[in-house]
């Protein structure tokens, strides 16, 4: 670790990992509720559990992004973070806001209250006071990182990262606008949700992935930066008007069906470019970096993001297909693999790369770390296939044959049972990952020739043989 203020990232990664554990455990509980619908129905209703699952996912991914920025910006800018105190204040605000959200959701506090009660908008259910806290924390972060970059060296990685983070914060302001007209509400709601995950988050993803490729492969910075600019341009070109694939059935003009279909089809391209970028960099670099686990997560991120966000997104993005598949388990299949591949794997990659330096211990337990990658990835991929088959059956029975929703759900029981099994694998993989980066591995010291000779002639050793 070259700069002392990079240690700020350790606190962010620690909180992110705690919320990661909450997210996957809550996901497993929700998976079982699909199998046994009355499970915890009195204590933890499904809608509350789903809010906790999705909100903890978003918050821990954001904390991972912030931690990654605090780790890589000093190295890229070649200077310390502008104000460590502000960085820790920002984290404190996020922790207090998260705690407030959890308590409000679980106990349904201040129901109906404009400022203190939770809202009914999916993913943006946070009470107004929490939203204000998020904006304050984001402004603190942007000021801190921007001042650091402006005072130091400018690179393509920090430029694209700042662009993504500033756009991310500004787009969140639409979370405060909640018009009475439902069609208008959904239009602006997608400004946050879509333009985050299929716009600004892609810029953050590309910049962090570029940093990892630079460090892990040893390829020239000029080559990495050219790829980065191309990927960022493709992401913005396709992602902004690609929002139209959410406008098909919410009361907007019919031309959005064609705009959404065309531009969201093009959204496959930046993810394919990112996958190509990662593998080409590894091939060009041919560098035997000791942190094999970080490289595995980086390549896994690029590959699974292409399939989850790109291929599975394309499967049901054309309006002729979406007319039948909209809101079925096909959407859930796409969402799980896309989020896992693009953003979960990305955060786990940068954490795997940074943790040995932040904790001051190397080597760390790479075998367990890589085992967690294969376990989690296999679980999410299997989950994606089961949900895809479930969604296909659901589409035919419900949208084509016209059977009732709950009757169809009863027929999908076997798919939900398999999905729960996949969820168990994901939780076990998450536990392995957290253990591998949190608990130091005992380093085995190989004895030299004199030590081996002494052991061979030791009376106790001879007797034991």
Image: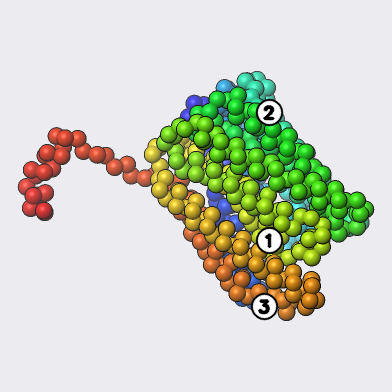
Q: Is residue 133 left or right of residue 95?
A: right
Nearest to the eye among marks 1 and 2: give it: 1
Task: Label 2: state its secondary structure.
Answer: helix
| Residue identifier under label 3 | 411
Residue closest to the eye, 396 or 191:
396
Label 1, residues with CA under 10 Å away: few <14, some 14-19, many ≥20: some
Is residue 250 something one can see in this rendering?
A: yes
Give whichever of discs 3 and 1 has the lower sequence position: 1
* Residue pictured at 82% horizontal, 44% vertical: 241
Q: Position of residue 42 (x, y in %)?
A: 66, 74
Task: Label 3: state its secondary structure.
Answer: helix
Q: Is residue 186 left or right of residue 341?
A: right
Label 3, residues with CA under 10 Å away: few <14, some 14-19, many ≥20: some
How far apart, in angstroms, are the residues tagged by discs 3 and 1? Answer: 17 Å
Is residue 25 something one can see in this rendering?
A: no
Q: Please count the marks in the image.
A: 3
Task: Label 1: state its secondary structure.
Answer: helix
Q: Position of residue 459 (x, y in %)?
A: 6, 47
Q: In this picture, is 12 found above or below 99?
A: above
How far apart, in angstroms, are the residues tagged by discs 1 and 2? Answer: 33 Å
* Residue pictured at 63% horizontal, 20% vertical: 152
- Which disc number belongs to residue 159? 2
Discs 1, 2 touching: Cβ within 8 Å: no
Nearest to the eye among marks 3 and 2: give it: 3
Q: In this picture, is 37 found above or below 313?
A: below
- Which disc number belongs to residue 332? 1
Q: Position of residue 447 (x, y in %)?
A: 21, 38
How far apart, in angstroms, are the residues tagged by discs 3 and 2? Answer: 51 Å
Give whichever of discs 3 and 2 has the lower sequence position: 2
Q: Position of residue 159 (x, y in %)?
A: 68, 28
- Which disc number belongs to residue 237? none
Give whichever of discs 1 and 2 has the lower sequence position: 2
């Amino acid at each position: 670790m070259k700069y002392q203020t990079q240690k700020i990232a350790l606190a962010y990664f620690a909180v992110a990992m705690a919320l990661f554990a909450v997210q996957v455990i809550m996901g497993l509980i929700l998976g079982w509720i699909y199998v046994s619908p009355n499970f915890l129905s009195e204590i933890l209703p499904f809608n509350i559990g789903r809010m906790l699952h999705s909100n903890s996912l978003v918050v821990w991914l954001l904390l991972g992004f912030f931690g990654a920025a605090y780790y890589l910006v000093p190295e890229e800018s070649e200077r310390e973070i502008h104000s460590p105190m502000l960085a820790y204040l920002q984290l404190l605000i996020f922790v207090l806001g998260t705690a407030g959200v959890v308590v409000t959701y679980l106990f349904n506090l201040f129901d109906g209250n404009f400022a203190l009660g939770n809202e009914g908008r999916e993913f943006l259910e946070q009470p107004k006071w929490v939203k204000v806290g998020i904006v304050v924390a984001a402004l603190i972060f942007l000021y801190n990182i921007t001042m650091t970059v402006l005072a130091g060296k400018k690179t393509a990685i920090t430029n694209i990262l700042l662009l993504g983070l500033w756009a991310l914060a500004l787009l969140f302001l639409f979370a405060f606008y909640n018009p009475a007209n439902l069609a208008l509400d959904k239009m602006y709601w997608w400004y946050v949700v879509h333009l985050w995950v299929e716009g600004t988050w892609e810029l953050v993803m590309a910049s962090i992935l570029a940093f990892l490729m630079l460090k892990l492969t040893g390829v020239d910075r000029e080559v990495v930066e050219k790829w980065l600019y191309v990927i960022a341009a493709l992401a913005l070109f396709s992602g902004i008007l690609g929002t139209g694939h959410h406008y098909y059935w919410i009361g907007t003009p019919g031309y959005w069906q064609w705009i959404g279909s065309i531009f969201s089809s093009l959204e496959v391209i930046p993810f394919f470019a990112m996958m190509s970028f990662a593998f080409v960099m590894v091939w060009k670099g041919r560098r035997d970096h000791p942190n094999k686990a970080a490289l595995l997560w980086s390549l896994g991120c690029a590959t699974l993001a292409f399939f989850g966000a790109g291929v599975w997104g394309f499967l049901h993005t054309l309006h002729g297909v979406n007319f039948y598949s909209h809101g079925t388990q096909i959407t859930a299949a796409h969402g799980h693999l896309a989020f896992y591949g693009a953003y979960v794997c990305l955060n786990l990659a940068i954490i795997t790369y940074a943790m040995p330096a932040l904790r001051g211990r190397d080597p760390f337990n790479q075998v367990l770390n890589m085992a967690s990658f294969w376990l989690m990835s296999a679980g999410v991929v299997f989950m994606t296939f089961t949900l895809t088959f479930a969604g296909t059956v659901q589409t035919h029975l419900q949208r084509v044959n016209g059977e009732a929703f709950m009757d169809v759900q009863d027929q999908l029981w076997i798919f939900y049972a398999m999905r729960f099994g996949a969820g168990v694998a994901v939780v076990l993989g998450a536990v392995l990952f957290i253990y591998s980066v949190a608990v130091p591995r005992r380093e085995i010291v190989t004895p030299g020739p004199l030590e081996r000779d002494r052991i061979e002639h030791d009376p106790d050793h001879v007797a034991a043989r």
